[in-house]
Amino acid sequence: MLGKRFEYNGRSWLPLNQLQSELRAQIEGKLKDGIYRFEDVPCCICDGRDFEALSTRDRYGLYMPVVICRQCGLIQTNPRMTQESYSEFYNAEYLQLYMGEEIPRPYFFASQLEKGRRIFAYLSTQPLSKPLATMSVLEVGCGAGGILHYFKQQGCSVQGIDLGAENVAFGRERYGLNLSRGTIADVRWDVPPDLIIYSHVLEHVLQPNNELQQVRRILPDDGVLYVELPGVKDVRKSCDREFLRYLQNAHTYHFTLTSLKNLLQRNGFELIAGSESINSVFRKRKGEASPAIVNDCPDAMSYLRSNEFRRKLRPPSASELNRWSRSAVLAALKTIGLDRAAKARYEAWKRR
């Protein structure tokens, strides 16, 4: 364990609004009643079962056993919820728990459009086989298609798939995008995609080897795969050194660039470019021999332990001070029975 504060205690690290608190209690109830079930699985990179525990909670205070594989260094949630349980969670609680409110689709689409601009700019600097603006693009887990809309504006032909029926309908009806509901196994195309995009999706996939084999089947030999996800070794920058803030129960895998590279190499890809952020570009590897796995466990553990040590030494951030002061105020109000009224006023103020 990285420290006592990573032990499951039923308390949220993040301040939660009333909706989030209710959803968290709902999830806890499903866990206790066995509606949400867990399963042990071998490491998807090395097939090993030699794990070291890092944490048993996520930032919402939900039970989440996070371990690191001692043989290859992949950090993962294990045991994890079954596919049936995850599907129920995504349908019933996921979005509102994470956003704290129902996010209007136009707003969400606009944020994805900006992400598309950033991804396009990044890929424009990479050694691609053809001009980016002429490529055929497939995005897996496209949501309402904001990223694809930007690529379409630049001249690309685009296609997207997603499990969310309402998001797919929004992108198709409002923007005329070629979106369909399903998984990568359901993809049908007239022209094979030159570029496949996974933006904050692969860390949610329970069977990444099966997923990546489907990608390899679809992608032509001169095509590229773009993978973007939250990087463990970017915690100091992206999460202000707070690994608990990074942990969220919807993520089953927690990658460094090395562990992501190991996974992709196992499935016949090689890294073109990448960073610990993680923004990365892969292409099919030529030849059958797979490179040896680089064990990232010592380096990843060194990073996390050093991060915990440095976190204790730095002064508290503005967000932490705000969280602590709000928690103290709510605790004081609770002692005199005014906490629910105060929360209601706070939520009403936020909505103004």
Image (spheres, grey):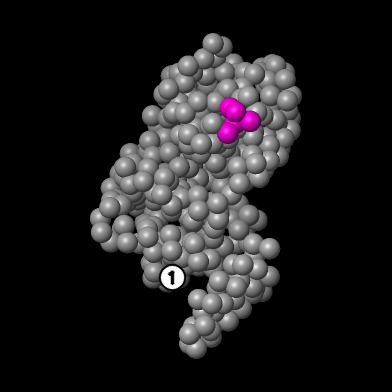
Residue ranking furthest to the top: 190
Q: Quadrant of residue 45?
A: top left
Image check: 189 left or right of 240? Answer: left
Viewer-side residue, 8 vs 73: 8
Q: Is residue 175 above or below residue 245?
A: above
- Give the quadrant of the C terminus: bottom right
Can residue 15 be seen by looking at this rendering? yes
Image check: 62 left or right of 31? Answer: right
Give the x, y percent position of residue 160. 55, 27
Q: State the SS at label 1.
A: loop
Judging by the rendered image, the residue that carries numbered circle 1 is 11
Give the residues in magenta. Answer: 170-174
The mark tally for this picture is 1
Q: Residue at x 53, y 66 (%)?
A: 17
Which amino acid, by three-letter code, is at mark 1?
Arg
Give the x, y percent position of residue 194. 60, 18
